[in-house]
Image (cartoon, rainbow, N blue to C red):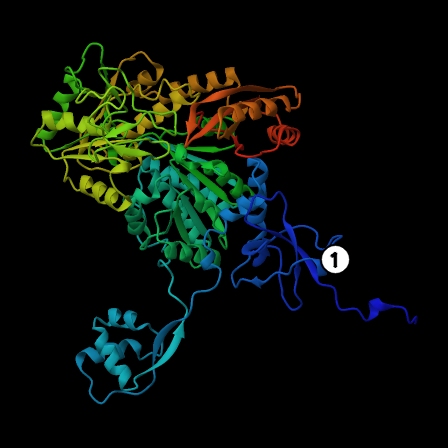
Amino acid sequence: MKDDSPELFAAPKSRLVPVLVPMPAPVPYSYAVPEGMAVEPGSIVQVPLGPRQVIGVVWDGPEGGEVDPRKLRPIEKVFDCPPIDKDMRSFLDWVAGYTLSPPGLVARMALRAPAALDPDPMVEGLRFSGIVPERVTPARRKVLDLAGDGLSWTKSGLAHASGVSASVIDGLAAQGVFETVFLPPPPLVAKPDADYAPARLEGPQKAAAEDILEGIRSGGFSVALIDGVTGSGKTEVYFEAIAETIRQGRQVLILLPEIALTANFLERFHDRFGSKPAEWHSDLATRTREKVWRQAATGEVRVVAGARSALFLPFEDLGLIIVDEEHDPAFKQEDRVFYNARDMAVVRARIGDFPVVLVSATPSVESQVNCLAGRYRRIHLPTRFAGAALPDLHLVDMRRHPPERGGFLSPVLLKAVGKTVERGEQALLFLNRRGYAPLTLCRVCGHRFQCPQCSSWLVEHRFRGQIQCHQCGYAEPTPQACPECGTLDHLVACGPGVERIAEEVERHFPDARTLVLSSDLGGVKRLRLELEAIANGEADIVIGTQLVAKGHNFPLMTLVGIVDADIGLANGDPRAAERTFQLLSQVTGRAGRTGRKSHGLIQTFQPPHPVMQALVSGDAAAFYEREIAERERASLPPFGRLVSIIVSADTRGEAETHARQLRNSAPSIDGVAILGPAEAPLALIRGRHRFRLLVHGRRSSDMQAFIRTMLERGPKERRSIHVQVDVDPQSFL
């Protein structure tokens, strides 16, 4: 043995591991693992990052490297929670690659509840000690009968189960009848029982349930689309898929576009399974969100119903994803990481090798095409449940039946509303425009009230006495005089919002109970109460925005009036016709769901338009056939691919120059074209000037590689410049 062998006596080398931290870094950072600390890929850890301590995830990749471990900072702490599993890590990597987002920002979406990373403290409980009290009252007898088997209870749980007050329990504890024990914290919601109240399905619903159960039982990845008219029992059908997954001992995720407002859905779930699902959305209390996160990770929560971000919960054993109202634009996130939760749900199911079920009365064109191509299995429900009839729909030609001067409701619609209220039934008037009027101007000088920070008009909200920007939230009291010419009392509201329609309704029907349903007139709690009041028949006429299209069930509603059906058709969006058809179909579907004869009146200046004709004829197949043919002819999604790039800056010149330099940096690839840069339709938002580039490619084009090359070759983001990339954009503003 040579004496000059220092490696024989050196301290053991520390491990090096890659850790993904929640910041826009392109790759994980390397950290040293202190001696005695055990970590694995997926472990959630606390690491130093500059002067801060941040939460990160030990990531996949080679350990070690060229760097001396002694020069690297060590991991500070490993959290006592289940690691992020391999499938979830693969999913996060896939999302980052597809959306061209920094992996750290994607991983942050899976770590939204930092306080949930350590286990909840144990809860103090009671257990029968074997000592019997000297005096046994009837109340004490009830407690002893329950607790005598030696099982542990919380004090409140034992009092509730025994039907006695907490003071009875305290009295027994004082006599030594109970000993103190510590129990794990109770689950947030009770476990659902798949056989609690089996569904009573009929005809098409029964056949659809059998079809979907076949896919669940066979296991593995599959995509099914439940496509049925409004009120056809789609929810009851996919409840059967949930029940089968629960029987298999696996977890279920239900994605809903407006979970905060769907109290009716939660009640229906409870009626079927004996308990509610855990909810996940931004309106929950922070502590509740933390409990849902942890109990999804540990497997205590079996079913989660949530908004799009629930897709990033780290489930212990996810076995099914349901995407209800899969066509809804609310599933698209357009902030930081741009993604479509419907599409990412399919990816997560494919990586995890389990089924996903998409549900809609008006499926997206993309899902329709996937069914035609055989990639998805279609399950069709052509009729309403229990024989209820669809509403009779009619167009009201506003050129032939104009409203009275200063009004927006035609005589035809007003007459129908009057008859409906007389019968003790409900009418819904739909206008997808919040506030009183979309524009206020001066009749003397023509001044228009515009947001000082955005290129959008200030919307009058008369109920609140404000004019407000719907882009940035800027608001000011409604002025009495024109700020340009100083003239008093010459400001005029142009166009209708729901508040203005309510004013017109009250003028015509002063004795009717009128309710305005709009997201800016109160929080989630108020909206839930208002929806409950409508369902209970406590309103005669409801005036609402798109909130009313979200799957609600109003038993007394027999008339739906569309105030302005043309509102979404003239905005230059390639999906304008599809979205208008979907929205108006969903709104008119609120009528007659309990079997009452119902009607829908659609006010339009364009009766021959294909969307209007498809609505009144009920021929959705012909509409989709035409829409699919037009998309294919123009190579628009899903037959081509789009990526939107928005460049914003504090000055118009900076934004335009950077956008032009980006375009000049693009590689030349056959089949990929760049449109722009052009000023965005909303050219100014929150004081930032915006320019757009739209990249159009073939279905087979590698758009991510193209954009990556373009960004690498192009100028770097400096000063106020910010570049956002939106793969598969839904908004073109």
Image vertical order of residue 48 relative to residue 477, above or below: below
Q: Which residue is mark 1?
A: 68
Residue 219 point in image, percent of width and height: 52, 46
Residue positioned 27% across, 37% down in the render: 520
Quarter of the image where one finds residue 550: top left
Residue 566 point in image, percent of width and height: 31, 18
Residue 239 point in image, percent of width and height: 37, 45
Quadrant location of the N terminus in the rendered image: bottom right
Q: Nearer the viewer, residue 690 or 116?
A: 690
Can residue 149 be seen from the camera position used here? yes
Residue positioned 32% across, 72% down in the render: 154
Quarter of the image where one finds residue 590: top left
Quadrant location of the C terminus in the rendered image: top left
Image vertical order of residue 534 relative to residue 643, above or below: below
Report the amino acid beneath label 1. Answer: Asp
Residue reaching furthest to the right: 2
Residue positioned 56% across, 23% down in the render: 657
Image vertical order of residue 152 relative to residue 41, above or below: below
Q: Nearer the viewer, residue 332 or 715?
A: 715
Q: For numbered disc 1, what is the local secondary structure?
A: loop
Residue positioned 25% across, 78% down in the render: 169
